Amino acid sequence: MNLKKNVLVISAILFLVLSVPVMAQDAQDINETVTEETPEVAAYVNGEEISMQELEQFAGVRDILMQLLQSNQEFASVMLQTESGQGVIEEFRKLKLEQLVTNELLVQEAKNRGIEVSNEEMNNIFDQQVNALKQQNNLNDEQLEKAIQQQGFESMEQYKNMFFENNMNGFLVNKLREEVVNEIEVTDSEAEDFYNNNQEQFETAAQKRVSHILFDEKEKAEEVLTEINNGADFAEMAKEHSTGPTAEDGGDLGFITAEERGLDATFRDAAMSLDVGELSSEPVETQFGFHLIKVTESREAGIRDFEEVSSQIKSQLRSQKQSQAFQEFVEGLREKSEVEINL
C-alpha cells in the first residue's frame, strides 16, 4: 500500500478515535450548562416567577450548543470548556432573561388594564393563521386538516386552542402597545422639517412611465403592432390582447428608471430608449414573451415634491415616535416594578 495513503488513513482513524470522546465530553458539558447550583427560579417579576426551565426553553442554549457542536466541534469545545466561553453563554442567558422579564411586565400591565382579545378578534387572527399555513404549504382545507392531525391534534379546534394557549400573551402585548402609542401623531410641520433637512433621501433619477402589451407569440404581437400603427388605441389593445397582469390597467406599469430592479434588463433598456409617445418599432423579446412597449410620460431627475412624499414621511416618523414612546413606557414599567434577578 502506498505510504502516503497509509499515513492519511492512520490520521483519519486517529482523528475519529480522539474526536469521539471529545464530542461525548462536550455533549455532557452541554447537559451540565444548567447545574445543581443553578437556581430553580431565574427571576421574580412583581412576585411572579420566571423559572429556570422557562428561561432555558426560551433561550434554547442547549439546542444552540448542540448545533454548534455538530457544525464546528472545535469552536463548541472552546465555548464549553473555557471560562471566557462560559461567560459568553451566561451573558446570552442573561440577555434572554431580560427579554422574558420585559414580556412578563407587559403581560401583567395588559391584564391590569383589563385588556382582552375578543372572540371575534381571535377568530380573525386564527383565520389569518390558517390562510398563511395553506398558502405557505400549498394546501386546501382538507389537506391542512389532515396535516394538523398528523402532528398529533385530534381536530382543527384542538389546534386552535393550543395556538391561543401558546400565543395569547403575545396578542395581549400587541394590544397594549396599540393602546400606548395609538394617540401619537406627526404634524405637517414635523414632516416638512424632516423633508427640508433630508433632501438627499428624496432625490430621484430620470423616470419614464411605461405601458406594455405582452404576447406569447411574436406573430400575434406583430399583428397588434400593425393595428396600433394604423390608429388602434394602445390601452384598449392591451386590455384585449395582453397576457400580462397589467392588462386591466391598459398595460400601465407606472414609472421606471434606468436602474430599475425587478424588471427584465432587456425590457427596461428598450423602454428607457423610447421618447414620450413613442412605441417600440418591433416586439421586444424577454423570458416572459414578446412585448409592445410605449412610453406615455417622463420625469426629469430631481427632488420629489413634499406633497408627493409627505404621507411616506409621516408614516416613517410616526413609526419612530411610536417605538421611542413604547420603549420609554417599558422603562417606566421596569422602574416602578419589583424585579429580582437570580442569575
Image: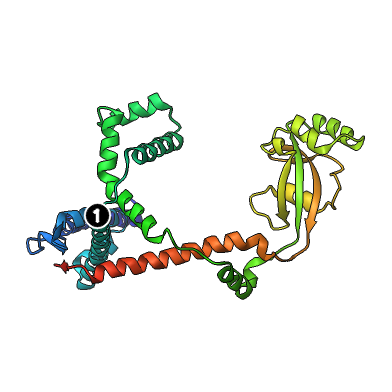
Q: Nearer the viewer, residue 193 or 244?
A: 193
Residue 228 relative to residue 184: left or right: right
- Work out whether 158 lies above or below 70: above
- Residue 243: image x %, image y %? 70, 32
Q: Residue 107 lies in what quarter of the image? A: bottom left
Residue 118 visible to an observer of this rendering: yes
Residue 20 visible to an observer of this rendering: no
Determine crowd level at label 1: few under 14, some 14-19, many 20+ residues with C-alpha closer than 10 A: some
Q: Nearer the viewer, residue 174 or 7?
A: 174
Q: Residue 241 lies in what quarter of the image? A: top right
Residue 78 relative to residue 193: left or right: left
- Residue 303: image x %, image y %? 70, 67
- Residue 304: image x %, image y %? 69, 64
Give, as a three-letter code, the residue at label 1.
Answer: Phe
- Residue 213: image x %, image y %? 76, 37
Toward the left, the furthest residue is 36
